[in-house]
Structures are given as C-alpha cells and as structure tokens.
Image (tube, rainbow, N blue to C red):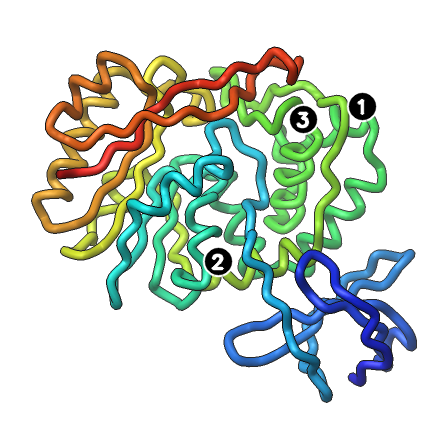
Amino acid sequence: MRILTNTGKYRGYRYFKYRHPHHPIGVGWIVRSNTRYSVLVMCRPCLHVGRPFILDNPLPLVQRSDMRPILKWVGGKQRLVSRLLPHVRLPPGATYYEPFAGAAALFFHLQPECSAPGDAVLGDTNHHLMCMYWAVRNSLVQVIANLKRLETQHSVEHYHEVRRDWNTWATQDETLRAAQFLYLNAACFNGMYRVNRDGDFNVPVGTKIRLSDPLHLYQASQLLKGADLKHSDYVTTTRNCESGDFIYFDPPYHGTAIGYNSDGFSDADQQTLAHRANILRNRGCRVMLSNSDTPFIRDLYSDWNLEMVTRPGTMNSNTTKRQRVPELIITHK
C-alpha cells in the first residue's frame, strides 16, 4: 500500500490519502505498534474499517500524549489523573494493577509505560466490562464495524431496542455485545452504568450520543495488548502481586455503590478492602487508593497519608448546578 498524499494531522496523528487494491482511494491514519508503522483504514462514506497494513513508505509519526479512556464511567478518574500521577512509582520490571478497572483512566494515561505484555493487570467484577475490553483488544475490526452500524441507526427507539437485546442476551457474538456495550455507554444518560436487582442495565437514553473514534479505539486496543484482563474481584486480581508492584484501588466510594454490582459495596466491604491494602503494603507493594472524604474512611486509613482533592460533580443533569466534590487520595507512609 502506498501513501499518495500527506494531508495533515488529526488528534495528534498524520492522516493521508492512500491507494490499496480493495479501496482505490481512501483516507487513513498512521499509527504505531511497537516499532512498526501501520495504518487504520477508514473509507468514507461506507465506514468500512479494514485491518492494519504495513506501509511501504511510512511517514514520521506524531504520537498523541492525551490518551483518554474509551468509556465515560461514573467515578472515572480522567479529571484527576494529574493529581494521581505524582504518587505512581513503577520501577523497571514492576507490574501495574488496577483491580477496579472501570474506565481505567490511569492505566491509559500511563502508556507507554504499561504497553508491553505483562506490564499491567486490569480486573473488575463487571463481566460485561471485561468482555468489552477483551473484544477491543483481540477483535477490534469487528467491534468497530458493529459499533458504526449501531451509531448510524441511533434514535430513542433504537436505544431501547439495543438495551432490550443487551439485557436478554439476544446475541452471543462477543464483538457485537462489546459494540452494544460501547453504544449504550455513549448514548445513555451521563455515561452511567447501573443495573437493577436482576442485573439488567436500566439507564435511560441521554440527550446526545458521543460518536466513537476508530483511531482512539485502535490505540486503546494496542495498549490493552500489554494488559492481563481478569474478570475477578480485587482479592483475586492482586493475588500474585510482588514487592515493588504498584496497585491502584478505585473502589465504589463510601456512601455510593453505583456501578459495582447489583448488591452494592457496604461498610464491611470497605473494611475488607482496607485490610487487603494493608496486606499488600506489608508485602512491599506500593498501594494507592481513592475514596470519599468521610469520617469513616479517614478513620479506616488513619495510619496512611491522606490527601484531600476535589473533582467536578457529574450526577446533576444541569451542568451549571454541579458542585465540586471532595475525595481522598490515600497512600501509605
């Protein structure tokens, strides 16, 4: 495949016109996998997504440095990454653990430090979330193709139809279910993941949809290739942690258990988590946690370093009425 015209930059990458046997003229972006250059093929208007091809005449790459999560997630840390990073220590050979993965904002921001196989472990008890990450990592082309079809049909009625199919497991295709997960997250109210007692996703449709970016998904897929993905609780996820490894616990916050599972996250669960954090600290691991700034949490981690930070609230539908919410960054002394 030959580049015909270098036409500019898009989100930090060069994009260009190219010639390929299956698509005579199209537009693509240069991306990098390890030390090789490749292209994510994107033909408009049909939105066909092709597999990456090695370029015959690669152009210099402009890497993006603002990698963001592929999900909007209640409690996500995208806006607090700058406050978390000073506490992260990853010596050579250490593994990064994020046992409450959610949107995994800190993991994605740490690239390329966590981009080699075995450099990171992401875990979550949300089976659907981890299956989505698995599909994006291993079957991205099919996920994007399915996602684009869902987005082009978006309407309130279509959203309800997809949500019904999702809850009834109308399809067993993992790539289609991953696309449905991403579509529902992008189209639902406030990017919220909430289930009822039966485990059914029940968030209403939002007022707008965030269209997916195939290039963004491609880079996320490459970064996820360096992560061990686990559908497990935080104890199982951190079972093999060794001295020097870094663990970031971002559990459901005290006083609000939205998003973990249909049973919530109780005070007893918070105490069990604190006990696990102490075990890992004594093992020689570096541990950091985030949680609500409440008397209960301050007492639970009284022998840890507590840093109070504030983040913008996200739960009010009126963005002008959202207030800043205090929370704690907890690190060991």
Q: Quadrant of residue 203?
A: top right
Which residue is disc 3 drawn over? 188
Answer with left or right where residue 181 lies relative to residue 285. Answer: right
At a point 74% along the width and 24% down the height, the residue shown is: 160
61 vs 147, nearest the viewer: 61
At numbered mark 1, what does the secondary structure look like: helix, strand or loop? Answer: helix
Q: Earlier in the sequence, mark 2 or mark 3?
A: 3
At numbered mark 3, what does the secondary structure look like: helix, strand or loop? Answer: loop
Which residue is disc 1 drawn over? 156
At numbered mark 2, what does the secondary structure look like: helix, strand or loop? Answer: helix
Please state the horizontal and vertical placement of residue 191, each as a whole percent of the image.
61, 29
Please state the horizontal and vertical placement of residue 217, each as a whole percent of the image.
63, 54
At a point 35% along the width and 34% down the height, the residue shown is: 250
Which one is in front in this view, the residue at disc 1 or the one at disc 2? 2
Mark 1 → mark 3, Cα distance in angstroms: 10 Å
Q: Amino acid at mark 3?
A: Cys
Q: Quadrant of residue 49?
A: bottom right
Mark 2 vs 3: CB contact within 8 A: no
- Up-down relation of residue 88 to residue 299 (above or below): below
Mark 2 → mark 3, Cα distance in angstroms: 25 Å
User: Label 2: how many residues lie within 10 Å, few (<14), some (14-19) or many (20+)?
Assistant: many
- Up-down relation of residue 264 to residue 154 (above or below): above
At a point 64% along the width and 54% down the height, the residue shown is: 216
**Residue at the bottom extreme of this rendering:** 56
- Up-down relation of residue 216 to residue 203 (above or below): below
Please state the horizontal and vertical placement of residue 130, each as a whole percent of the image.
47, 44
User: Label 3: how many residues lie within 10 Å, few (<14), some (14-19) or many (20+)?
Assistant: many
Residue 224: which numbered mark, if any?
A: 2
Q: Earlier in the sequence, mark 1 or mark 2?
A: 1
Answer with left or right where residue 79 lies relative to residue 268. Answer: right
Please state the horizontal and vertical placement of residue 116, each as a whole percent of the image.
40, 68
